[in-house]
Amino acid sequence: MREYVARQVVGMIPVLAIVSIISFGLLYVLPGDPAAAILGENA
């Protein structure tokens, strides 16, 4: 059971890294300010 959990945790690390890189990359590639999009123009 410990080996299973260890393999799952180790397998999760690259997935989290890839998802983080993609999400932060999209924030820089897409036009506009993410804070202004969330809060609105008058915030």
Image (cartoon, rainbow, N blue to C red):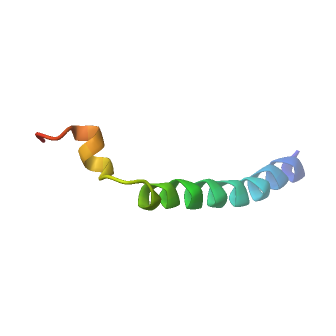
Q: Nearer the viewer, residue 29 or 19?
A: 29
- Residue at 37% from the left image edge and 54% from the top image edge: 31
Q: Nearer the viewer, residue 38 or 30?
A: 30
Residue most extreme to the left? 42
Q: Quadrant of the C terminus?
A: top left
Q: Nearer the viewer, residue 19 or 8?
A: 19
> Dividing the picture into quarters, in which one does residue 15 lie?
bottom right
Q: Quadrant of the N terminus?
A: top right
Is residue 13 found left or right of 6 in the rendered image?
A: left
Q: Is residue 35 above or below residue 18?
A: above
Is residue 28 found left or right of 37 in the rendered image?
A: right
Is residue 4 found left or right of 11 in the rendered image?
A: right
- Residue at 16% from the left image edge and 41% from the top image edge: 41
Image position, residue 23 (x, y; %): 52, 53
- Residue at 50% from the left image edge and 55% from the top image edge: 26
How many marks the image carries: the answer is 0
Is residue 32 found left or right of 11 in the rendered image?
A: left
Residue most extreme to the front? 31
Image position, residue 32 (x, y; %): 32, 52
- Residue at 88% from the left image edge and 53% from the top image edge: 3
